[in-house]
Amino acid sequence: MPKITFVHRDGSETVVDAKNGLSVMETAVDNDVEIEAACEGSLACATCHLVVEDQDWFDRLDPPSEDEEDMLDLAFGLTKTSRLSCQIRVSDALDGIRFRVPDET
Ligand code: FES
């Protein structure tokens, strides 16, 4: 089980033993990370926006689809390592990654 760290807006952290095959969004919601995920993963909102803390980790992820990029443009608090967490699948390759809740939602 890969370990994923979520950094909350107040700076506190939740380290999760994530289940392979779930999305990062589902993992976050299951662990009370403060994202809304209003469309439940159908790429129709931007409320599952999380920021990958480290550029190297961001570069290692499969790149976002065009649809994800279009939707990300609507996200508040966009950064250059922002992703929609419903579009990232948990796998062992994510062991050690850290996601931060954006300052604005
Ligand atoms: Fe709506 Fe990810 S949950 S785009």
Image: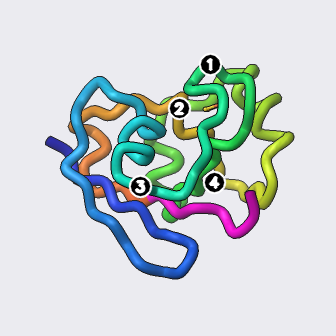
Residue 42: mark: 1
Horizontal and vertical percent position of residue 83:
61, 43
Percent across and percent down for residue 3 are 22, 53
Q: Which comes before the other along the chain, label 4 or label 3? A: 3
Q: Is mark 1 on a helix, strand or loop?
A: loop
Q: In 3D space, how far apart are the residues under numbered discs 2 and 4 (Cα atoms)?
A: 15 Å
Q: Give the range drawn in magenta.
A: 99-105
Above or below, comparing residue 95 to residue 34 in the picture? above
Q: Does the residue labelled 1 lie within 8 Å of ligand 1?
A: yes
**Crowding near pointer 4: few (<14 within 10 Å), some, many (20+)?**
some
- The x, y position of residue 102, in whole percent, is 65, 62
**Amino acid at pointer 4:** Thr
Residue of label 4? 81
- Above or below: residue 10 compared with residue 94: below
Q: Marks 4 and 3: which is nearer the front?
A: 3
Amino acid under disc 1 = Ser
| Distance from Cα at disc 3 to Cα at disc 2 | 15 Å
Disc 1 versus disc 4: distance between alpha carbons? 21 Å
**Quarter placement of the N terminus:** top left
Q: Is mark 2 on a helix, strand or loop?
A: helix
- Check the picture and name the quadrant holding the C terminus: bottom right
Q: Nearer the viewer, mark 1 or mark 4?
A: 1
Contact check, label 1 and label 2, Cβ < 8 Å? yes
Q: Is mark 4 within 8 Å of ligand 1?
A: no
- Which residue is label 2 attached to? 86
Of callouts 3 and 2, which one flags the residue occurring earlier in the amino acid sequence? 3
Q: Is residue 40 magenta?
A: no
Q: Residue 32 carries which label?
A: 3
* Callout 3 amino acid: Asp
Q: Residues within 10 Å of mark 1 (few under 14, many from 20)?
A: few
Q: Which of marks 1 and 2 is nearer the N terminus?
A: 1
